[in-house]
Every structure is written in structure tokens, then in C-alpha cells.
Image (cartoon, rainbow, N blue to C red):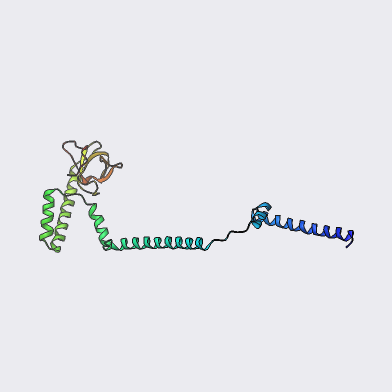
Amino acid sequence: MDTTNIQALDTKLSAIDKALAAAKARKAMKEGTSTDTVEIATSVPRQKQTSEQKAAKLAERAQRQAQLKADREARRAAKASQPKGPAHMKKIDRAASKLPSLNGQAQLLFNEATTNFSAEQLTALALHLQHFNRVKATERALGQKIEAGQAVRIIGGDPRFVGMTGTVTKAQRIRCYVSVPGFKRDAYCFTSDVEVCEVAQASTGTHG
């Protein structure tokens, strides 16, 4: 082969090398890597894991999966062991927790009535008591005047406040606002749901 042909061949090979290098650079730019990284990645052979390393990795994975399964089963067993009552009983229990407390004598009467009376008579008694309270509330609304600054005892309305004393902050024709110690917001009551205290004791804020 003469010199001219050798030079032409070298020129052709050089052009091919340049084209390959340019294509490799474009590919590296698209993949977010440099040409140096590409060459290093292609030049360094990937180390193969030994059979011992593979076995250790498989054992570790199996142990982790077994632990996760054991945790799930433990949570499921703990949940299943908890007693489950009817949903409607939960509502009844919540309602009972919001009832005002009874003093000793009232609790004795309640226990005697619920023990000795039939369901029919208990219903009738509850209605009679409700009517009696309505009559007394009407009498209070007609016979007492509620004014701001008075100490009052809450005897009806929101169960949270029943039995507590407070100070009237605002009085209207049939409604009033009462500031009760321990509560950020005033109690909003009917004037028939409060009775004026003869002795100011608004600072007690206790059941009784």
C-alpha cells in the first residue's frame, strides 16, 4: 500500500473516531453524565458477588420479611383481643359521661327508683320530673329579674354547667350570658335555667 492510500485511510479512521466520540458525548449529556464518567464506567468492570455474599443478602432479606410478618400478626392479634361493644352503646356511654353529677341523696333515690320500678314507671316518673322542672322554670322566668353582675347558679340547660355558679355578664329578656370559672366562653342560658344566689359565690365554680 502506497503512502497516499495510508494517509487517506488514517484520515478516514480519524473521522470515524471523532464521530464516535461526538456521539458518545451527546449521549452522556442527555444522561447527565460526563464523557469521563462514561469512559470510567465502561472501562471499570463490575465486580461480581460471591456465592457467600449472595447467600448472606438472601438470608438478611428473609429475616426482614419474617420480622415484618411477625409484627403484622402481633398487631392483628392485639386488635382482635380488644373487646368490641355495639356501636350504639358507645354513643350511650358518651351521653352518660356528659350528665351532671348527683349528690348523695339524689343518687340514693335514683338507685332505688331504677332498682324497684318497671321501665314503664321509670318513663312516667321521668316525664313527671321533666314537667315539674318546666313549671318551676316558668315561675322563675316570671318572678325573677336577671341583671349583669349578679351571682347565679345554673340549674338547667347545658349539662356541663349544671350545678355551677357564675356571674352574669349580659342579660336579655329570656336569655343571659354567665361567666363560669374554668371556662373560656360564657355559658349561654335561658333566664329560667339560672337562679339568683342570695350570697355571692361565683368564685366557687363547683358542682353541688
Task: Check the picture and name the quadrant holding the N terminus.
Answer: bottom right
Observer-nearest of 50 and 186: 50
* Residue 143 vertical position relative to residue 52 in the rendered view, above or below: above
* Left or right, residue 43 beside residue 20: left
Say which residue appears at 39% left-offset and 63% top-offset: 69
* Residue 46 vertical position relative to residue 173 in the rendered view, above or below: below
Observer-nearest of 78 and 94: 78
Count of numbered circles on the image: 0
Observer-nearest of 176 and 174: 176
* Left or right, residue 136 beside residue 6: left
Residue 59 lies in quadrant: bottom left
Q: List x then y, in percent, for residue 152.
A: 21, 40
* Residue 112 vertical position relative to residue 169 in the rendered view, above or below: below
Say which residue appears at 11% left-offset and 61% top-offset: 117
Observer-nearest of 74 and 176: 74
Q: List x then y, in percent, for residue 75.
A: 34, 60
* Left or right, residue 114 beside residue 69: left
Task: Check the picture and name the quadrant holding the C terminus.
Answer: top left
Say which residue appears at 78% left-offset and 59% top-offset: 16
Say which residue appears at 10% left-offset and 56% top-offset: 112
Residue 31 lies in quadrant: bottom right
Q: List x then y, in percent, for residue 96.
A: 22, 55
Q: List x then y, in percent, for residue 174.
A: 25, 45
